[in-house]
Amino acid sequence: MADLRMTTTRGTDTVLDEATMQGFKTSLRGPLLRPGVEGYEEARTIWNAMIGKRPALIVRCAGVADVIQAVNFARTHHLLVAVRGGGHSIPGHSLCDGGLMIDLSQMKSIRVDPLRRTARAEPGVKLGEFDHETQAFHLATTAGVVSDTGLAGLTLGGGMGWLARKYGLSCDNLLSVDIVTADGRFLTASATENEDLFWGVRGGGGNFGIITSFEYRLHPVGPLVWGGFVSHPVSKAKDVLTFYTEFSGAAPDELTTIAVLAYSPEGEPVVNIGGCYHGPLDVGEQVLQPLKTYGPPLADLLGPMPYTAVQRMFDQIVPPGWRYYLKAGFITSLGGDAIDILADHFATVPSRSSLVVIFQLGGAVSRVPTDQTAWSHREAVLYQFEVISVWQDPAEDEPNVRWARELWDAFLPFTSGGVSVNHLGDEGQERVLASYGAETYHRLAVLKKQYDPTNVFRLNQNIKPTA
C-alpha cells in the first residue's frame, strides 16, 4: 500500500505514508478501499447520478469498532469526512473528493421485539429491508415513501411517510440511538440518557456523530391497508387539485394523501391523487370513496393492498442511477393562484420523468410540541411541496435544473419559508437556517460546539459549532 495524498478539513492536502495506511487497514474488520481496487466504484456510487465525487479512501465498516477507528483516524489526520448510510442524499453529502468516506451501508442488522413493539436497526438499513422485518409481525413505524431510501438519513432529518399523520415523523418514533461522537466516544442517547443529544439527533441530521443503532417504537399496521392512486388528465389539473385540497383537508389522521403531477406510463401528462389509509378496511373504503368517484378518473389503482406494496409504490419513478435536482418547501394552503402556477409550469417540463409532488402533513405531526425535537416545523404546515427534475442524459442538465428553479421561484410566494433538511440541496447557510428557525438553530449550534467543536461532521446540512 503506497503513500496517499488526501484532502483535509482545512482545504489543504496531506500525505499519509505507507506504514500509516497499513496500520489503519489492520485496525479494521471491514475493507479499506482506494481508487482502482475492487469494490471502490460500487461503494462510491450513490442514488443521484448528478454526484460523482471520488474519495481517496473508503472504509466499509463491518461494525461499531470500525466506525470508532475511522472517526479517530480522520480526526488525528484532520481528514475531510463524508458518511454514507443508504446513499440517498439528494445533494450527495455521502461523498467527498479526496477525503475519507465512512461507509455504513454494510451494517444492516435489524432486530424486532414484537412483544415490546420496538425494533433496532443499524445505519445501512434501507426502508424496504426494515419494512420486510417489521411486517412479519404486522408492525411498522413511519418510514418514508421510497423503499430504497436509507433509514438513517431519513430519521435524522425528520422522516415523513404514510403513517406520519397517525403516528408522527420517523424521529418522533425514535426511542434511543447509539452514537460515535467526533472524539471517538460511544454514547447512548434517549429520553433519560444524554437527553440533549437525543433532542439534537431527532431532526438535526448527521451533525453530532455517526449513529450505529436506531431503536424505534412500532405500531400495529397491516398486513393490508387501503392504498394506491387515481389519475386525471393534466388538462383538468386546476379542478382536480381544488378537489384534492378539499378532500385532504377533511381527511382523518389514519389517511395520508399525496398529489403528483407526472407523466403516465403511456406518455400522457396526468394528475395522480392517492395515499394510504391505515385502519379497518371497510372504513378505509368509505373514506376513500370520493377519490374513486370524482371525475371520474382515467385510471383507478386504489384498493386494499399490502402495506409493503404501498411503501414501494413510487420506487419505479425515482430509480437509482438517474439524475435528480430538487427544490422543496412547506405550504400552509393550496389556493387557486398557486394551482394555476403549478399547472401552467408543468406544461413546460423538459423531461417526462420529472414530478411535482404535494405531500400531506398535519395530524400527529402538528401535535408534537415544537421544542420536543430539532424538527421544528410543526404548527400550520399542511403540505410538503417538491419540484423534482428527473432525467438521464448529462447533456440535459441545464434545462432540467432551470425548469425546477423557475417553477420554484414562481411558487415561492405560496410557501411558508421553511423546509425539511431531508429535501434541501446545497442551497447555502441561509436555507439551513430556514430549515430550523433561529431559536432551534441556535440551540443546535451550542450542541454542535459541545459534541463536534472542530466540525468533523460537516458534509451535511451543516450546523456550525458556535457558542
Image: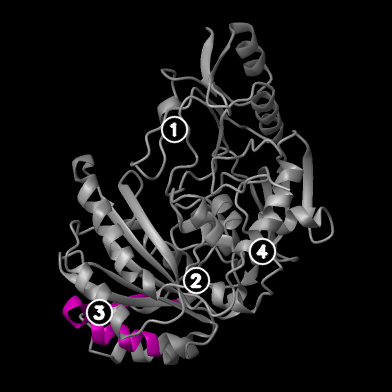
Q: Amino acid at mark 4?
A: Glu
Q: Are marks 1 and 2 in contact (CB under 8 Å)?
A: no
1 vs 2, front mark:
1
With respect to residue 202, does 457 lie above or below?
above
Indicate the secondary structure of the residue bearing disc 4: helix
Q: Residue at x 40, y 28 (%)?
A: 41
Q: Which residue is mark 1?
A: 44
* Closer mark to the observer between disc 4 and disc 2: 4
Q: Which residues are magenta?
A: 226-246
Residue of label 3: 340
The disc label shown at residue 162, or none: 2
Badge 2, how many Cα within 10 Å: few under 14, some, many 20+?
A: many
State yes or no: discs 4 and 2 in contact (Cβ < 8 Å).
no
Residue 60 x %, y % = 56, 30
Determine the CA span between mark 1 and mark 3: 41 Å
Mark nearer the N terminus (3 vs 4): 3
Q: CA distance from mark 4 to mark 2?
A: 29 Å
Along the line of sight, the residue nearer the viewer: 120 or 443: 443
